[in-house]
Amino acid sequence: MAELINPVKNGAIDQTSTTTTTKTSTKGTDALGKDAFLQLLVTQMKYQDPLNPNTDTEYVAQLATFSQLEQMQNLSQTSANSQAFGLVGMNVIVKSTDTSGGVTYKSGTVDYVAMSGGKAQLSIEGSLYNIDQLYQVIDSTYLIKQGLPYMPKEVSETFDKANPKDITFDVNLGSGETIATDVAVIINNNILDSKYITVAGNKVTISKDALKDLEDGTYKPTLVFNDALYTTVAGKITLKVEGQAPTEDDNTDDSSNDNPSNSTPEA
């Protein structure tokens, strides 16, 4: 498959047309169509040798060949026209060539199909293009996926209960119609309270207070973005929880023997 002529930006094809120059033949097309075949047949009849003319059988065979060629071209045109009606609402790229040989690629959505001279024409942003100018057809789902939120790389973090710290990692909030502004985090089939989740730019932070009560083990958090499609990303984060959380007894010093008020006064 050829590469896209126009890049995808914000979940849509870049509408800026690009122009390249190609060489065109001064002799016209190299394809032998039915009109050229008919001209050759007429020329052969006109300039045949009177002393050795072609037989009726030869003419019949040539006419049969001409008829087959015409039917194949008509069938090809009918197939192309049928294809055109199925392109309504699709994102396409069409190619135009001007008189100087410049080639321009135009991308857009097919609004409707019109018939002119037995050929289908595609309407793109108010302009009509022959079906022969069709260059590429792009699935709309493909365009949507370009703007979906995602995680640019896998993340592996360790949460030590003895020395708890927030967990921060990078995300891409998407673009265009599928851009997200917030994200939910699911750990061990439980949705963390939103007060423990902070989204700043392309960074998501999970507060240490949301992780301190987890049992030791390895977890695979799932992210759910709030874009139009509620994009879910799973299996990209590995969180290992270990260690023992400090207790109040660990933070309280036993100073009863140092308190003078607890000593026995001298007689």
Image: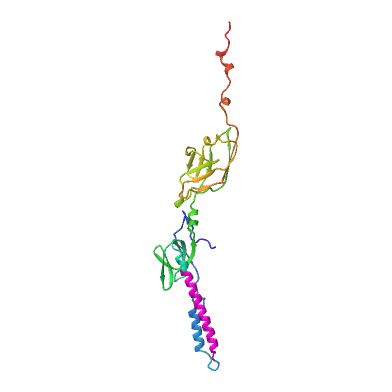
In the picture as drawn, the residue positioned furthest to the top comes out as 267
- Residue 119 point in image, percent of width and height: 44, 71
The main secondary structure of the magenta stretch is helix
- Residue 218 point in image, percent of width and height: 60, 40
Q: Quadrant of the C terminus?
A: top right
Q: How many marks?
A: 0
Q: Nearer the viewer, residue 192 or 122?
A: 192
- Magenta-drawn segment: 53-81
Q: Residue at x 53, y 84 (%)?
A: 62
Q: Residue at x 48, y 75 (%)?
A: 74
Residue 141 in view, yes or no: yes
The answer to which quarter of the image holds residue 188 is top right
Q: In the image, is residue 48 above or below residue 254?
A: below
- Residue 251 point in image, percent of width and height: 56, 25
Q: Answer left or right for 127 relative to 39.
A: left
Residue 74 lies within the magenta run: yes
Q: Quadrant of the N terminus?
A: bottom right
- Residue 6 point in image, percent of width and height: 48, 60
Residue 29 in view, yes or no: no
Q: Nearer the viewer, residue 183 or 205?
A: 183
Residue 138 lies within the magenta run: no
